[in-house]
Amino acid sequence: MKIEFYGATKEVTGSKFLLISDGIKILVECGLFQGRRKEAEKKNREFLFDVQGIDYMLLSHAHIDHSGNIPNLVKNGFSQDIYTTPATIDLLKYLLLDSAYIHERDAEYINKKIMKRGEDPIEPLYTVEDAKESLNLFKPKVYENKHQRGINFEFLDAGHILGSSEIIMEFEGKRILFTGDLGRSNLPIIRDPKIPGKVDILIMESTYGNRLHRDIDNAKKDLEEILKRAISRKGKVIIPSFALERAQEVIYAINSLIIDGKIPEIPIYVDSPLTVEITSVFMEHPEYFDKEAYTLLQENHIFNYGKINYIKDVEQSKTLNTKEGPMIIISASGMCEHGRILHHLKNNIEDERNIILIVGYQAKNTLGRKLVEKQEIVNIFGQPYERKAEVVVLNEFSAHADRNDLIAFTEKVSPERIFLVHGEENQMEPLGKSLREMGFNVDMPEVPGTKYEI
């Protein structure tokens, strides 16, 4: 049996690898690489393996860095089954079409520039039609049911986002566990991660492999103080948020503060058509909720309390530029690379009354990372802006396991061999060192295409 890594090797995006045994080739994940535009373009367009030689695919969850290059895979000739959970499929009906739309618009924008120079136009990475075609390949599989196709495989609750999975694969007596993105215990809305018992091979993410999250209750207290501060100076709180999971968690947390009387009701604008659609998927899948979230769902308070406005229309979005604070604006994209959040940042970043609240991971070289670094001048739409708005980072809303969570999980599954993936070097290396000191056999694939016998 061999395992070949083609993405998320000492980086956090573009997750994908191949499991090969007795002529069976299984692709696990097919995510988009996100980072510098030219590097991302090259990595996303080129597959370093035979796409048409794959027998089928397994997908852990709907985040674009795990799923977002599937339409391009299909465009390049893949036509086999893709197994994942029902909620993941429902989420991808929106996420993949949205991603395709962005690729089409990006290509259109670039072509306007390069065709003026007499250069040949570029094609989008994939189109809406490619995304629609890929959706026909998905086959739903529920948690904790074993399936057999060359190998046995099973999905378990990863506690990361709605429908997220750990994937157990069994072949010739070996038990291989891919964590996908592993969640944290005691987070709101979603149930805690499942512990699957002993495994032989562990393929584990390491996004926060050298970082500890504070308790989520501390984040709620900080959020309360941040909102009170903005209210007192009649400022706007701009929250760049991933449409999937992070936006719903933040809405849930703000609603809880209002319900508990910790902050006054102020206007909340969820300015992202995709977030509106994704939130509707959450409402359709209460079977993934923990008890507290399920209770609030029954009371219609989980995502709909107070002065909350879900915005789809672009003209309505534009009116927020002239409205006076205090108010909260939650908008995509989460790393501030595209979408309506760029307009809100452009219009509000130079006002010292405002707060930019970062609640999610920001990859290298993104605008979001530059804001986290509190750079004084940032470019938005190619123009420089002076950052006068306060920037606050609340990593506690992260749905990723931290260092202690990852170590505790590893001890419980007690693997003979570990492969660390999906983490930047400064997070992965310290985690790998600690696990080795504990007696575990740890590999950290360096570059795409790295191959191992297992």
Image (tube, helix red, strand yellow):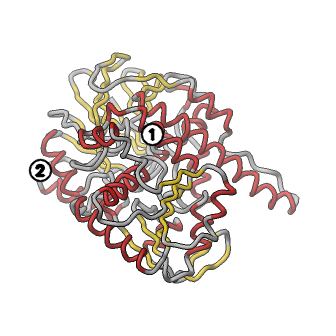
Q: Is residue 449 visible?
A: no
Q: Position of residue 392 (x, y in %)?
A: 39, 73
Q: Residue at x 39, y 62 (%)?
A: 359
Instruction: Note whether 279 is above or below 308 in the view shown.
Output: above
Front label number (1 vs 2) = 1
Quarter-of-image position of residue 403: bottom left
Q: Amino acid at mark 1?
A: Ala
Q: Position of residue 282 (x, y in %)?
A: 42, 38
Residue 265 in the image: state x and y as whole percent. 41, 63
Q: Where the C terminus falls, by quadrant?
A: top left
Q: Residue at x 67, y 75 (%)?
A: 383
Q: Which mark is residue 62?
A: 1
User: Closer to the N terminus: mark 1 or mark 2?
Assistant: 1
- What residue is disc 2 on? 439
Residue occupying the point 17% across, 54% down: 436
SS class, disc 2: loop
> Quick one: SS at disc 1?
loop
